[in-house]
Amino acid sequence: MKITQDLRSQVDPTKNKSRLMTEQKQSTFHKLVQSQAQHLKEKELSKLMEDIHLQGDRLVRHRSFRDLAIFKRLVREFLEEAVSEGLELKKTHQFSAFGESRQLTIVKEVESKLLLLTEDVLQEGQNGVDLLAMIGEIKGLLVNLYI
């Protein structure tokens, strides 16, 4: 029975400390990776927002269906990124008086504004100021969703 007592006395308490240190290092590494991933996602959303701004200006100048399609694609990409990644990172949910989530309401409103923009582009009698105002509203909603 002395053998088991000798084995117990040989257990090194520094092994527990080294395991704890390893877990702490992994935790800080995990936090660093998460912060870098969030930074990259924010950078990607900012780039998409800049592209939307440039394409909106191009759409007002040229009023072509091609420019409209590119603008709508960029807005939808932004919405997909913001909803799938950005809102999950922030974990914020605000509810309207009707019980709907506020972000979902903004996404629906952006979609309706895109439909109105499409109708305005189809009606060639609209002036550039109206299109610019509509594009400004859409960009404002996207910024509201992003923040």
Image (cartoon, helix red, strand yellow):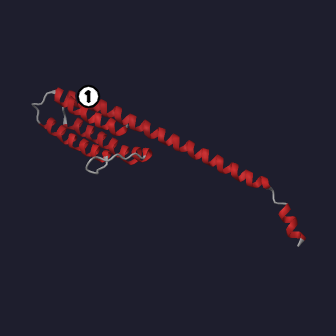
Q: Is residue 141 above or below residue 89?
A: above
Identity of the residue furthest to the right in this view: 2
Residue at image point 37% right, 43% down: 82
Residue in front for this viewpoint, 105 or 36: 105
| Relative side of 29 to 45, left or right | right
Counting the numbered discs, the total is: 1
Give the residue pinned by disc 1: 57
Apparent side of residue 56 relative to residue 29 in the rendered image (left or right): left
Q: Position of residue 66 (x, y in %)?
A: 22, 37
> Is 94 situated above or below 133?
below
Looking at the image, which residue is at 26% across and 47% down? 97
Q: Residue at x 27, y 38 (%)?
A: 70
Q: Position of residue 68 (x, y in %)?
A: 22, 37
Residue 136, percent from left and from top: 25, 31
Q: Quadrant of the C terminus?
A: top left
Name the foreground residue: 64 vs 24: 24
Above or below, 66 relative to 10: above
Q: Residue at the far front: name it.
A: 97
Q: Quadrant of residue 129?
A: top left
Name the outermost residue toward the left.
125
Check the image and name the residue furthest to the bottom. Answer: 1
- Which residue type does callout 1 highlight? Asp
Other-residue count near label 1 (Cα within 10 Å), few / some / many at <14 / 14–19 / ≥20: some
Q: Secondary structure at mark 1?
A: helix
Residue 37 x %, y %? 49, 42
- Where's the N terminus, which quadrant? bottom right
